[in-house]
Image: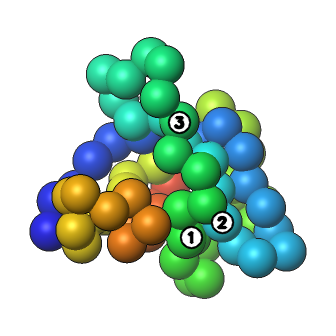
Amino acid sequence: MRLRKAVLKSFNSGDYTATVQLAGSYKVYLEGIAVARNLPAAEMALGRKVAVIFFDEHNAKDAVVAAVYT
């Protein structure tokens, strides 16, 4: 398990998924990342910093946005 910093690029409130750009990665976006349901949709503003937990570092679909911070 690994924790990484990222920037929120988009948020889909319908299925509670996000597109994020990992810190240090300027060209790669990860799409369809699950967002923890305890995070209010109002907090998921584009450009916000987020914490992403990777349960399997080789499978981005097995990750979750766990926190939003400034």
Q: Quadrant of the N terminus?
A: bottom left
N-term-proximal mark, 1 vs 3: 3
Mark 3 surroundings within 10 Å by alpha-carbon count, few (fewer than 14), some (14 through 19), many (20 or more): some
Instruction: Tell me which residue sits at (38%, 67%) in the image.
Output: 63
Q: Please identify the quarter of the rendering in which residue 33 is found.
A: bottom right
In the displayed structure, would residue 61 be above or below residue 8? below
Across and down, in percent, residue 43 comes to 69, 57
Badge 2 amino acid: Thr
Instruction: Tell me which residue sits at (57%, 82%) in the image.
Output: 38
Numbered circle sitting on residue 17:
2
| Residue found at the far left of this picture | 1
N-term-proximal mark, 1 vs 2: 2
Instruction: Tell me which residue sits at (23%, 57%) in the image.
Output: 58
Label 3: state its secondary structure: strand
Instruction: Tell me which residue sits at (33%, 42%) in the image.
Output: 5
The answer, for residue 60, to whether it is visible in the render is yes
Numbered circle sitting on residue 35:
1
Numbered circle sitting on residue 29:
3
In the displayed structure, would residue 40 be above or below residue 70? below
How many numbered circles are shown?
Answer: 3
Distance between mark 2 and mark 3 Cα atoms: 13 Å
Across and down, in percent, residue 40 comes to 69, 71
Distance between mark 1 and mark 2 Cα atoms: 5 Å
Label 1: state its secondary structure: strand
